[in-house]
Image: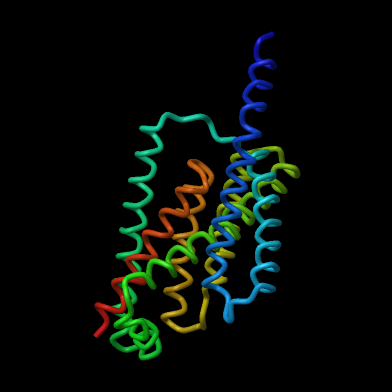
Amino acid sequence: MSEPSQVASIDSVRQPHAAGAALCTWLLFCIALVPQLDPITVAGIGVGGAFGLGLVVIGFAAATRCRPLPMRPLTRHAMFVMVSLGCGVLVGAVILGAQLALATWDRSLHAQLARFAGEGVAQPLIRAYSSAVFEEVICRLFGLSAIAWIAIRLGKDRELAFRIALWSSAVLFALGHFPDPSLTGLMVLLFNGLGGLLLGWFFWRWGLPYAILCHFAGGVVIQGLGPLLVV
């Protein structure tokens, strides 16, 4: 007879936490939106902020209904941070290595990497942060959560719904980065698809911050070292 009261108690604690997390996520999204705008205008920020608010509200509503995350000790969160950053650096290094190899004969890829040569330290960090937050909110928080919520409503099987949502969001993430049907384009499709699977797993099992950290670490490696290493 004690189980319903325990569930109610947990839900009553979780809701304020989810509301605060959603607000912080939206503020981070608004900050990440600014580098995406060209030119930066008040109207652009307003429209983008309203768009981001919708994504965050729907994403959190779907995610908390699909898989409420358990309370964990700080030591576990510290481990998640280290693993997320480490995986991001590793994946970023693999992708950068493949890009540098292809850039030796793909002049367009070479030019894409070299165009940021000589810039300051802050620019790669800003781009990595912007893309990490922007894309994780859209693809994981909103996309993966919404697909999982729909799949659960249709099939009632949470693990199957997660697998459907994970693969679907990874495919959409990869297609969103697909430049053209060339060897370089196929590499982009493959690596972004695999990266989408990893980021989706981090998001679903550990939470959105760890997907963002992993994405950010990989972006720093690619954005920061790529222009320095391309020859």
Q: Quadrant of residue 219?
A: bottom left
Q: Is residue 124 left or right of residue 101?
A: right
Give how far across and how far down residue 131 sits, in percent: 49, 66
- Identity of the residue drawn at 59% across and 52% down: 141
Q: Nearer the viewer, residue 19 or 195?
A: 19
Q: Nearer the viewer, residue 64 or 164?
A: 64
Q: Quadrant of residue 104?
A: bottom left
Q: Is residue 99 above or below residue 141?
A: below
- Identity of the residue drawn at 42% across and 53% down: 213
Q: Is residue 173 above or below residue 3?
A: below
* Quarter containing the N terminus: top right
Q: Is residue 139 left or right of residue 106?
A: right
Q: Nearer the viewer, residue 110 or 118?
A: 118
Q: How many marks?
A: 0
Q: Is residue 22 above or below residue 33?
A: above
Give how far across and how far down residue 204 sits, in percent: 53, 44
- Identity of the residue drawn at 65% across and 60% down: 52
